Image: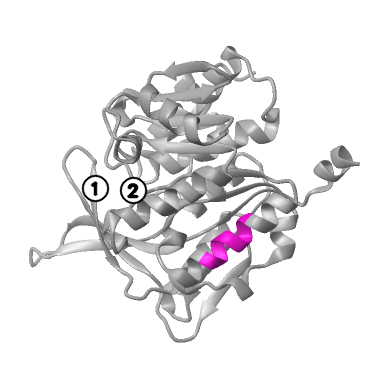
Amino acid sequence: MGRMEKKMKKYDVVALGELLIDFTENGKSNQGNPLFEANPGGAPCNVLAMLTKLGHKTAFIGKVGEDFFGEQLRDAITEVGIDADGLCTDKEIHTTLAMVHTYPDGDRDFSFYRNPGADMMLNKEEICEDIIKETKIFHFGTLSMTHEEVREATKEAIRIAEESGAVISFDPNLRPPLWNSLDEAKEQVLYGLKHCHILKISDNEIQWLTGEEDYTAGVNWIRERYQIPLILVSMGKEGSRAYYNGMMIEAKPFLQKNTIETTGAGDTFCGCVLHYICEHGMEGLEEENLKEMLTFANAAASVITTRKGALRVMPTRDEIQNLLGIIIN
């Protein structure tokens, strides 16, 4: 019966979390003022947008304000094919905004307008149980764990996903300015680790969390405390690693001369990993499977660094495979 049920699920991946506007710098006006472009942003929907591009059925649970930007965001995710039935609207609180400053090498700094912002007003009662029960994979991060109400909503969603037998995927996606204290952030990251089957964590996050400079030592620190079958470490310009069943697989990055910004690279990578798990499952993955998964995900992440924004400009399978140098018949 379990097997049959799995096949009958309506969604491949459902994600919960923040949906916001990323204001990214886009040149200067005639008067010398910086121009900003209002890009749809937020890690969970970036992940879903990548998955949708690869042909998966996805849905999002979150909250925007009843305002111009909220409408823009609802339209943007619907347009790329993400089911927005679980997206709530807050009549009082405005849509969350972030200003993104990009440095010459493509790295970024964030300033958030979120005190409060609609994304953190999602509450337990607004969680659409039916959507979560209908997914093979449930994905979340910690931006939906910074404040009490949305944290309770996130934990409720995780509980429903666990009860429904979903694979749980977690990307901490730490944004220090959004936390009252980094101790509180750590506590919530540890909650995520306790409940996930797939962890995607960045190089600086694993060092911060574990106090270990070496990534393998950091993964061992996590493994001594939590049973997580698949751990992925994204290392930016150094590529990525997968830790699974005692194996450590590393794949080199695809560095592009025309990289303009790194927004969404980690999310694109994460989306491709979840794509691979949707196709192949979590069991019995061999070294060559993990290498294939990482190489594909690195290539996709590399493509997104050559584009402004992420959600609306995710690469197609063909674009990823062209970069991989695979000849498509």
Kindly identify the residue that appears in the image at 43 percent across and 19 percent down. 251
Name the amino acid, label 1.
Arg
Q: How would you rate the neighbour count of disc 1 (Cα within 10 Å): few for under 14, some for 14-19, many for 20 or more?
A: some
Name the amino acid, label 2.
Lys
Depth check: 323 or 252 in front? Answer: 252
Closer to the eye: label 2 or 1: 1
Secondary structure found at label 2: loop
**Labels 2 and 1: the sequence-earlier one:** 1
Is residue 83 among what the camera can see? no
The secondary structure that dominates the magenta segment is helix
Residue 125 horizontal/vertical position (percent):
63, 75
Depth check: 31 or 171 in front? Answer: 171
Residue 151 horizontal/vertical position (percent):
49, 64
145 to 259, vertically: above or below: below
Q: Is residue 206 left or right of residue 157?
A: left
Is residue 136 among what the camera can see? yes
Q: Which region of the structure is painted magenta?
A: 152-158
Kindly identify the residue that appears in the image at 56 percent across and 66 percent down. 153
In three-dimensional space, the C-alpha distance between marks 2 and 1, rounded to whole angstroms, equals: 12 Å
Kindly identify the residue that appears in the image at 60 percent across and 38 percent down. 197
Most distant residue in the front direction: 225
Q: Looking at the rendered structure, which numbered label has been put on residue 48?
A: none
Most distant residue in the right direction: 1
Most distant residue in the bottom direction: 92
Residue that numbered label 2 is attached to? 308
Q: Is residue 35 left or right of residue 264?
A: left
Q: Could you say which quadrant of the image residue 253 lies in?
A: top left
In which quadrant is the N terminus drawn?
top right
120 to 275, vertically: above or below: below
Residue that numbered label 1 is attached to? 108
Say whether residue 234 is magenta: no
